[in-house]
Image (cartoon, helix red, strand yellow):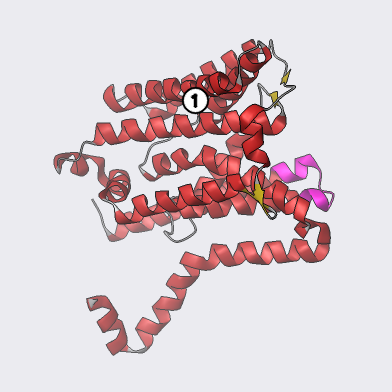
Amino acid sequence: MTQSSLDTRSGTPGRAVLPGRSLMRYGFFLLIAVVFVIFALLRPTFVAPGNIHGMLMSASIAALMFLGLTWLIAAGEIDVSFMSVAALANMTVAGLVSSGAGWPLATLGGLAIGAVFGGLNAGLVAWLRLPALVITIASGALAASIAAAIGLGTSISLSTTGFVGGFLDLRVGILPVLALAVAALYAGAWLAQERLTFGRYIYAMEQNRAAVEEAGVPVNRLLFVLFLLSGLMSSLSGVLLAANLSSGQPYLGTSYFLDGLTAVLLGGMALKFGKPNVLGTLAAVIFLTGLLNGAALLGWTDSQRQIVRGSLLLIGVGLVVFARARTRKRHPA
């Protein structure tokens, strides 16, 4: 309130700063709108109901996978096992269903994979204080190896998608019910991030973890919850992919690795400049899905789309590093 009063009294300086801040906070959303309009003009099929439905389905599953990763990176940690855990959950479901188990049991088995690997990462990082990057690389490699072993290196086709497939088929107009459910989940996550002390602790940990611990915050418990959440969200997306693809794909994780990091870091451009946040991640997932879909409709090759992915990841990393360096310079720990 004091700063607002000062800006009002000072006249020009206050008015000069606010547009710049607004551009940093909301410029990414404007970029998404511009890119989507361009694709719609160049390829009208981009906004065809069937294409929109397909993009929303893909974006919803990806957004689920990246939710836990968003908060881990915001807290100054990392989880690079998320895509391998999703692949293992996917293959676990496919393996169980193909062997005669029903979809309810297979779904529980897939979700259990997320709980096991999320808990493993959480225990080693939160309680034993081992480096998250090294631990999640190792656990991700383990998950990927088991996923490949389940199908002997090949995919597993499914003749039925059970109740999960039935849920994915539900829609309201052109909107998948899954997209509406994910939107509601992200709305709840945003409230937790912005309105609860939970969110403040996450961002404070990235700034100065030692100070947060000295303040009496149960940092280890919070990290445990974040890693467990990442594992569960990854496994849930793997279960949904099994029904969406009607198969288990042991190597599907490779296509989500770049997208996950890019979405979280690029999403840091939105709302909280330089700070990963759930709405930014959701916007970035939609942006990436639309950009890659539009590029495919325009006839871009896979290698060209990979170049776009890599370039966006570099931009996201650069912006986050720049913003955090500027924040630390203004508010040294």
Q: Residue at x 38, y 53 (%)?
A: 324
Q: Amino acid at mark 1?
A: Leu
Q: Look at the image and tell me in which quarter the N terminus lies.
A: bottom left
Please give the residue where the numbered disc 1 appears in the rendered image. Answer: 111
Left or right of residue 126: residue 65: right
**Percent position of residue 72, x then y:** 40, 39
Quadrant of the rendered structure where residue 115 is? top left
Name the residue: 76% across, 59% down.
47
Q: Secondary structure at mark 1?
A: helix
Residue range corresponding to the magenta coloring: 294-306
Q: Can you say whether 12 is above or below 30 in the image?
A: below
- In the rendered view, does 11 fall on the left or right side of 317? left
Q: Observer-nearest residue: 248 or 70?
A: 248
| Residue 294 visible in the current orientation | no
Residue drawn at x 72%, y 46% is: 54
Residue 305 placement: quadrant: top right
